[in-house]
Amino acid sequence: MKSNSLKILILIGFLIPSAWTESQGQKTSLQGFSLKVSPGALVYYGDLSTNDLNLPKRIFTGSKFGIGASMIKQFSPFFGIQALFMAGSLYTAASDNSYFTGSLTEFSLSARFDPLKLLKDNSFPVSPYASVGVATFGFRSVRREIGTNVVLLPNFGYENDGLTKTTRQTAMSMPIAIGLSYRILPYLQLELEHSIRMTNTDLIDCFKGPNTANDLYSLTSIGFRFSIPSKSTAIPPAVTENQAVPMLPRTDSSEINMYVDCQIPETIAAGKSFTVNIRILKGKYSGPGKLIQKYPEGFTTSSDNTHEYTLTFNNQNVIVDWTNMPADSVVTLKYDIQTSDKVSGNQSIAERFEYEELTGPKTIRFNDKIFVENLKQAGGNDDPANQVVKPSGLGESVKAAPFIKANIRKSEALPGIEFRVQCGAFRDKNKADTHLAAKYKISEIIQEEYTDQWYKYTVGSFPTYEEAARYRDQFISRTGILSSFIVVYKNGKRLSNIADAYK
């Protein structure tokens, strides 16, 4: 018996460090781990009990305090492994004018199942669960006569005086539990659980009847489970505005690959309005979501509560809030922004999208820029390339550099997969020359296509994403067009998602 228990202890002790090492090796920083403390009532069932299965009566008349501390590794939303250490006391008064008391410690490993999280919508704050496992436990028990406290032999873990401690007795058990979990906060859950241990010994109560079954014990507890937050997955430095922002590859299959695509015009006239088009590729995710965009002074919009989301504008922040995001894998929305006639030049928009994964809140951060043309402040000349400037120390005006015409061609269809870098998008195609050549001095061939009521311009052509990414970084460094991003084509057709190229 002791030899088998020792082997189980060694096995369980090996599995937990192995899971830790695997997590650290994958650089997930305890991703998917949670800690739980479960105080409650420890109840004994056996030869000396009255065999009353009324659980509330048992808890109030024949229970002692017990507490469990566990670590849970969640491998998916509905399946995890729990390692538990439990300690507590046992007590019961028998009908033969005797009673027994004992102390108990247990170490177990259990598989835990959350069936509701198999459903498509797993955002319920309340979720039932069940677990089953294997445990080894040690106990030290003494039986006494009521009134006189005379020790009745045999004892287990004590000398015959019932006071001097000896080696604990060890045995095996199979813990089976059912529970109800309630999410209080993103990282914190309250769990009500009842678990019973079926053992392979009849000696816990210091009494062995001729035809009696093995002893059992149960723990009814209220647990507090804290999920260890993982570090937010970093976004590559080259990811910029208007780009569908991918999260880096994840090792935990329970997490979500989220993409955000924000379309904002590159140029707008002061005093005019423009439309912001948002597209979120979320897959099966259906929990809460929040998009926050911080606009500079001079940009305004109005609130909107007529859709499945709430849009508010406060302190220059546009906040789009979903209590639960729609079931569609792609969520789109659009709204209008009005600019003041006093705004001019390059303006930055800081943006982020927040949502919740199994391991806690996640944030995708990205930025956009928009150039506001203000003809009043520029002296009324429509062409920025021909603005009159006055160099310091000179009494005469000098014209800026002459107009440079861009090398623009119609987009060409190529077989297979092709990656390009988009450097601009305009409603008016006549602005392309001014902005792409004269303003940013782009000398390479620029391909033009008309789609979604926009003239879109791309540079470069590469067979792999990696080559396109290197070119994009060099292009941004050389031209200063921070809004440049990678687009993909398949047999000449532009795809909305880079991942679609490999389907």
Image (tube, grey):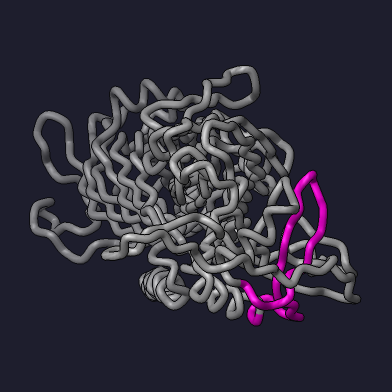
Q: Is residue 326 magenta?
A: no
From the top left corner, tell me how far across and down residue 385 is, in percent: 56, 59
Residue 258: in sight, yes or no? no
The structure residue drawn at horizontal position 16% and vertical position 57%, both measured from the top left corner, is 158
Q: Which residues are magenta?
A: 442-467
Where is 198 relative to 128, above or below? Answer: below
The answer to whether any part of residue 154 appears in the image is yes
Q: Position of residue 212 (x, y in %)?
A: 47, 44
Viewer-closest of 387 and 352: 387
Q: In this picture, is 48 found above or below 110?
A: above
Between 480 and 162, the one lying in front of the other is 480
Q: Which percent across, then down, holds residue 41? A: 31, 34
Instruction: Give whichever of 349, 498 is nearer the camera.
Output: 349
Question: How many callouts does the rendering have?
Answer: 0
Q: Quadrant of the C terminus?
A: bottom right
| Residue pictured at 63% horizontal, 17% vertical | 306
Task: Please give left or right for residue 192 compared with residue 490 in the image.
Answer: left
Residue 465, magenta (yes or no): yes
Asked where in the image residue 424 lies, by quadrant, the reply is bottom right
Check the image and name the residue furthest to the top: 306
The answer to whether residue 317 is above or below residue 7 is: above
Residue located 51% across and 62% down the image: 482
Q: Quadrant of residue 107?
A: bottom left
Q: Quadrant of the N terminus?
A: bottom left
In front of the other: 497 or 450: 450
Residue 283 lies, in percent from the top left, at 69, 48
